[in-house]
Every structure is written in structure tokens, then in C-alpha cells.
DNA sequence: TTTAATAATTCACTAAATAAATCATCACTC
DNA sequence: GAGTGATGATTTATTTAGTGAATTATTAAA
């Protein structure tokens, strides 16, 4: 074995690479369509998904420093996509919320790739879906040992709900 | 719908997100261990994999402008990781090559995540491997319509399963 | 009531990325 | 074989992301 071109490990890694690449390119395009940058879009998606988030939690979820979040939120505020609101429980904290503009902008986003994926996925036979999910989860397990919080951000409920993947 | 429980589409997207996240975090760590930035590491991996590459092809493969490649290569040259060599066929072109330092630096890199993945993958039963590959390729097909050149860069090298390409 | 620790921000700085302009070289066509 | 246009790499100027360190306000603990 392992004589010809690629062995299975390589094939799986190459497929993974294709997935990664497609996703990254898609994120760029989507962000551009929305009129913000990819990083800013990520913030919008998380905030929209949880309806509210503090800079602290955003920083953690995006694996980025709080300082970075501050500047991203600054720019989104300047574009009218999100707003800041003081927390009442703890006055050190600030809640970032979507504006109506931000929410509707997200909803109107094309989201071409995800729509295609969701449609293709929905078109699979039941057992195929199950197999795909289990395969993906298996790969994810192999990759992230310390089981990071890889929460939603992409509930695909409605086809249009821009999510990042 | 979509209250608390996720449907299969969501589950698959969440798994995908975990894969993406693990990969991104890993790329950061690995780059730091190597002593370069993630973008610079990507250049090194491609160059090392093909033994030689022009800025043009690097730009295409990384989906980035040539100008960006120029500055990345500048920095790698400054760090002694790669070198430039004039092409003989077309004197407009330049070939980027690994230095010995660059090559050995790459080889000595920890590469923890990929090793873990490769080991886990290698430990699967034959039919499981086959199923995983087919699932991943299926997902990749769903995601990237226009079938971009998603070649290697993640060839599994170190663990002896390597092939070259 | 001091003293810690926490949450967000500001500041100074580096890295990555782009578009636009420039320069050299190649490929044609006349 | 001279001129024209396309191509490959670079330079310049600018924007965006990202960081660590310092700062400010607030909470929590001693």
C-alpha cells in the first residue's frame, strides 16, 4: 500500500483542506456582500445568534484579545450594525446588541455557499445524513482534543441566516 | 422549528465549525512554534511541498495578491527560511526555494494536531477510513462548487505515511 | 476600608492584505 | 527588428486585525 499517488490519510487531509478553503473564500465573499470585513461579520453572527454578548465572551469565542473586539465593535457601531448597552447587573460590563439595520443586513445576505450546502445536505437520504454527521463529528473529535466551546453560531434554521462555519 | 435541539444539518455545521476552529488554532500554535506567522508558514509549506514556487503561483494557491506574497517572502528571506532565485526560462519570474534552515525548521516543527489526527486516522478500521474519506470528499464537493485546486500542503509527512506529490 | 481582581478601553506597534503605479521582460505583429 | 501590449514582480500608500501594556471604573474580598 502507500505506493501510488495518495493514501487515504492524504486523501482525507486534502478533502479537509478543500473544506477549509471553500469556507474561507466563502466567508470573504459573504462579508463583502454584507459590506463589512470577515472579522466584523463574525462578530455580527455571534451577537445575532445570542442576541447579546459582552466583549469578554466575544473575545473568548473568537480566540482573540479584548482589545481586538473593542476595535471591531467600534467599526460595527460606526456602520450602524450593532450598538453598545451598559449592563445593569455589572456596570463594568457592556452588552453588544444588533441594531435593526444590522439584523436585517445579515438576513438579506446571500449566503450562497451555506444555502448550497444546506440544500445538498437536505437532499441526502436519511442514512447518508446520519453517516455524514457521524463522520464529521469523528473528524472534529480527532482534531480538537480539548473540546473547545464550538457552539452554534450557525443554527441553520432558516436558510438565510448567515452563519459563518 | 429549531428550538433547543439541533437537527442534523445543524449538527453537521457545528462539527464543521469545530474542525475549522481546531485547524485555525493549530495553525497559529504551529506557526508560533516555528517562529513565523501563520501566513508565512503557509508559504513555507507550499514551497517546501513543491520544492519551488513562483510568487504568481503562491498568490493563486493562497488566494491572495502578488503584492502580499512579496512581503511574506521578504520576511521569510530575512529570517533565512527561504531564498529567491531568478528563473532561467523567463527572467520575469522568480523561484522561491527553501533554505536548509527553512526545511529543517519545518521538519522539526511539533505539528501536534496533525500527528494526533494522522494517528487517530491510522488507528481506524479499513472500512472506517474509507467511509471517512468519502464523507469528507462529499462535504467538500457540497462546499466548493468550482472545484478549486485544493492540493496538498497538509501531506501527512512525518509519520511515515508520507508520499510526495 | 484597603486591596484584588475583573471588564472594557486606549495607546503604540506589528502583520497581512489590497489597489495602483512602476519596471523589466517576454511575445507578437507589422 | 522596432514598437506594442501583456505578464511577473515589486514598491508605495493605506486599511484592517491583532497584540501587550497601561488606564479607568467597578466589583468583590480581606
Image (cartoon, coloured by chain):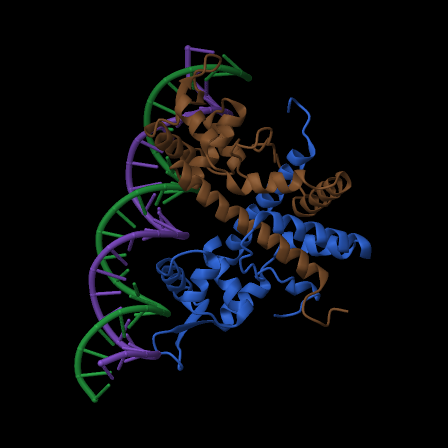
Chain colours: A brown, B blue, C purple, D green
Q: Position of residue B81 (x, y in %)?
A: 46, 66
Horizontal and vertical percent for residue A111? 50, 38
Residue A19, position as x, y percentages in the image: 59, 50
Image mark count = 0
Q: Viewer-proximal residue, D3 or B49?
A: D3
| Residue C3 in the image, given as x and y percentages of width and height | 46, 21
Asked whether residue B112 appears in the rendered view, the answer is no
Q: In the displayed structure, does residue B132 sit left or right of residue B20?
A: right
- Relative to C15, is B1 on the left or the right? right
In depth, the one of B41 and A165 nearer the eye is A165
Q: Quadrant of the N terminus of chain B?
A: top right
C21 left or right, relative to B124:
left
Residue plotted at (62% across, 39% down): A119
Q: Residue at x 54, y 65 (%)?
A: B105
Residue at x 71%, y 44% (from the top left corner): A132
For residue D22, what is the image quadrant?
top left
Give the quadrant of the C terminus of chain B.
Answer: bottom right
Q: Is residue D26 above or below residue A143?
A: above
Q: Is residue A7 visible?
A: yes
* Residue in front for this viewpoint, B140 or A80: B140
Residue A136 lies in quadrant: top right
For the point 66% across and 53% down, the residue is B137
Amino acid at each position: 500500500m502507500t505506493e501510488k499517488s495518495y493514501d487515504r490519510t492524504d486523501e482525507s487531509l486534502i478533502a479537509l483542506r478543500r473544506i477549509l478553503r471553500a469556507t474561507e473564500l466563502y466567508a470573504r465573499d459573504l462579508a463583502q456582500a454584507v459590506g463589512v470585513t470577515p472579522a466584523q461579520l463574525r462578530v455580527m453572527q455571534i451577537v445575532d445568534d445570542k442576541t447579546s454578548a459582552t466583549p469578554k465572551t466575544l473575545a473568548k469565542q473568537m480566540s482573540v484579545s479584548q482589545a481586538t473586539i473593542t476595535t471591531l465593535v467600534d467599526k460595527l457601531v460606526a456602520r450602524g450594525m450593532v450598538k453598545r448597552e451598559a449592563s445593569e447587573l455589572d456596570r463594568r460590563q457592556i452588552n453588544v446588541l444588533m441594531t435593526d439595520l444590522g439584523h436585517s443586513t445579515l438576513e438579506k445576505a446571500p449566503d450562497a455557499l451555506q444555502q448550497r450546502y444546506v440544500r445538498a445536505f437536505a437532499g441526502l437520504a436519511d442514512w447518508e445524513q446520519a453517516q455524514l454527521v457521524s463522520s464529521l463529528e469523528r473528524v472534529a473529535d480527532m482534531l480538537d482534543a480539548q473540546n473547545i466551546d464550538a457552539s452554534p453560531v450557525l443554527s441553520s434554521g432558516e436558510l438565510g441566516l448567515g452563519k459563518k462555519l
